[in-house]
Image: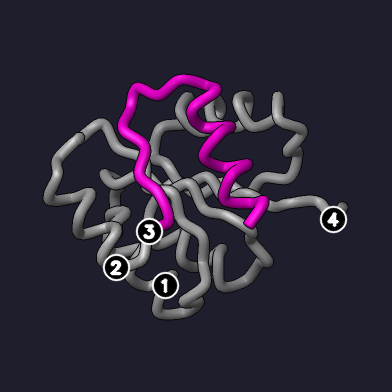
């Protein structure tokens, strides 16, 4: 099985570490990290990424803007939106744009693993 590459885009370093630790328990070991939406877009375009974990609230470009540009660049991109804001409007907008899934913070380790491994198996 080829190694899956997960991009974690979140302005909070502790959150990126938490997601990495959770996914490492599922055997995922290749990560690309982005600190803001613009960096996520740039890194996505330069690397082969199997799935993106994208925070909604970030500097430079927020998660919705980053999601829009990533989907325009790659309509088949698998993107999981993560946010502490459990707003229905934001969730519906992200799904409309093309997000594969939406996780509300604080999330449990097994929830991240279940969503990510489920999307990667398709």
Residue located 62% across and 49% down the image: 6
C-alpha distance separating marks 3 and 1: 8 Å
C-alpha distance separating marks 4 and 2: 29 Å
Q: Where is residue 10 in the image (x, y as percent from the top left)?
A: 42, 41
Q: How many labels does the image show?
A: 4
Instruction: Indicate the secondary structure of the residue bearing disc 3.
Output: loop
Q: In this view, does 27 lie above or below 65?
A: above
C-alpha distance separating marks 1 and 4: 23 Å
Instruction: Identify the magenta region.
Output: 100-122
Q: In this view, does 15 lie above or below 102?
A: above
Q: Which mark is residue 71?
A: 1
* Mark whose residue sits in front, 3 or 1: 3
**Which badge, 3 or 1, comes first in the chain's sequence?**
1
Q: Which mark is residue 2?
A: 4
Q: In which quarter of the image is residue 22?
A: top right
Q: In which quarter of the image is residue 60?
A: bottom left
Q: How crowded is mark 4: few (under 14 residues within 10 Å), some or many (20 or more)?
A: few
Q: Are marks 2 and 3 in contact (CB under 8 Å)?
A: yes
Q: What residue does disc 3 label?
A: 99
Which residue occupies the foreground of this view, 21 or 11? 21
Is 118 covered by the magenta stretch? Answer: yes
Q: Where is residue 102 in the image (x, y as percent from the top left)?
A: 35, 44
Q: Which mark is residue 97?
A: 2
């Amino acid at each position: 099985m080829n190694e899956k590459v997960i991009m974690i885009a979140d302005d909070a370093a502790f959150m990126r570490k938490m997601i990495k630790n959770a996914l490492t328990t599922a055997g995922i070991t290749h990560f690309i990290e982005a600190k803001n939406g613009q960096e996520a877009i740039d890194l996505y375009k330069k690397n082969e990424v199997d799935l993106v974990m994208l925070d909604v609230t970030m500097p430079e470009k927020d998660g919705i803007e980053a999601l829009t540009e990533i989907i325009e660049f790659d309509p088949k991109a698998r993107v999981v939106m993560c946010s502490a804001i459990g707003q229905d409007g934001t969730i519906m907008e992200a799904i409309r744009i093309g997000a594969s899934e939406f996780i509300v913070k604080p999330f449990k380790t097994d929830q991240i693993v279940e969503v990510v491994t489920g999307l990667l198996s398709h």
